[in-house]
Image: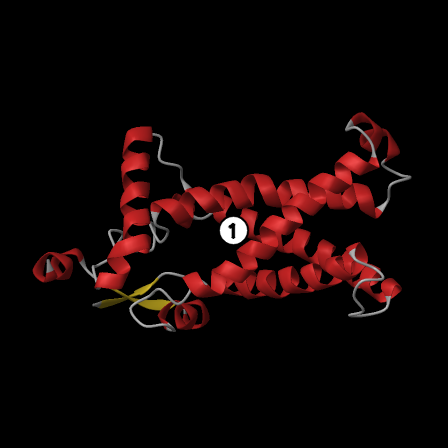
Amino acid sequence: MSKQYLHPLPVRIWHWTNALCFILLIVSGTQIRYLGLISLMPFRTAVAVHNFVGFVLIGNFCIWLTFYLFSDKNKAYHPELNLLKQSRECFQQLKYYGYGIFKGDPSPHHAGPFDKFNPLQRMLYQVLMLFLLPAQFFTGLLLWDIKRFSGIVDLLGGVRVVDTVHVLIYIFFVFYILIHPYLATLGHTPTEHIKAMISGYEDVEEESEVHTVA
C-alpha cells in the first residue's frame, strides 16, 4: 500500500458542497413536486430553498469546471477513445463489482492522482457532469422564471416537456444519491474512500502487490 494524494482541497470542498446541495434540492424538490402528499416544509420555503440552493450548485459546478479546465488533474475525466478497450475495462470492472469483490479479488483499477476513476466511474461522471447536470441547470432555470424564458420554453415544446425532463433527471439523481454511499464503502475498508474525501489521501494498492496476491 502507498498513501497518495488523490483529492486536492478544491475538489474536496466542491464534493461536500455538492453533496449537501443535492440533498437539499432533492428534499425541497420532492416537497414542491408532491405538494399535498407529503409535508416536509411549507411550500414557499421549499421553493425558496430550491431556488437558492440551485444557484449555489450552479456556482459550485462552475468552480469545478474552472478547476479542471486549468488543472492537469483533468486527465481523470478524459474519455477512452478506444471503444474496444473501454468495453473490455468496463466489463472487468462490472465483473469485479458483481462477483470478484465478494471473493476478495483485487480491483482491476489502480487509482492514481491522474487516474482516480475506474472505467465505469469515468464514463458515469462524463455523462453526469457534462450532460445531465447542465441539462438539469438549464431546465431548472427555465422553470425558475417561466415568463422570462417563455420563448425558449415554447421552443422546447412547452412547460410540460421542460418539467418532465427536469423530473426525470431528478429521479436519476435520487437513485445516484442512494447508491453513492454504498459505492463509497467499496475501498480497502468501508471508510477508506470517505476518509480520503476528507483528508485528500488514500491508501492505494500498488500493481506489484496485486501481482503478488494473484
Can residue 152 be seen?
yes
Up/down of 62 relative to 130, above or below? below
Residue drawn at x 73%, y 59% as measured from the top left? 30
**Residue placed most toward the observer, 2 or 89:** 89
Q: Among all residues in the image, which is located at the extreme top?
A: 155
Up/down of 88 relative to 72, above or below? above
Look at the image and tell me in which quarter the C terminus lies. Answer: bottom left
Check disc 1 and report its element: helix, strand or loop. helix
**Residue placed most toward the observer, 184 or 8:** 184
**Residue placed most toward the observer, 105 or 136:** 105
Where on the picture, by quarter, is residue 146? top right
Q: Position of residue 140 (x, y in %)?
A: 75, 46
Residue drawn at x 54%, y 55% as measured from the top left? 176
Q: Among all residues in the image, which is located at the extreme right?
A: 147
Decide if residue 136 is on the left or right side of residue 150.
left
Packing grade of label 1 (10 A; few <14, some 14-19, many >=20) is some
Can residue 138 be seen?
no
Mark 1 residue type: Phe
Q: Position of residue 206 (x, y in %)?
A: 19, 60
Q: Among all residues in the image, which is located at the extreme front?
A: 37
Where on the picture, by quarter, is residue 52? bottom right
Residue drawn at x 10%, y 56% as measured from the top left? 211
Check disc 1 and report the residue beneath it: 67
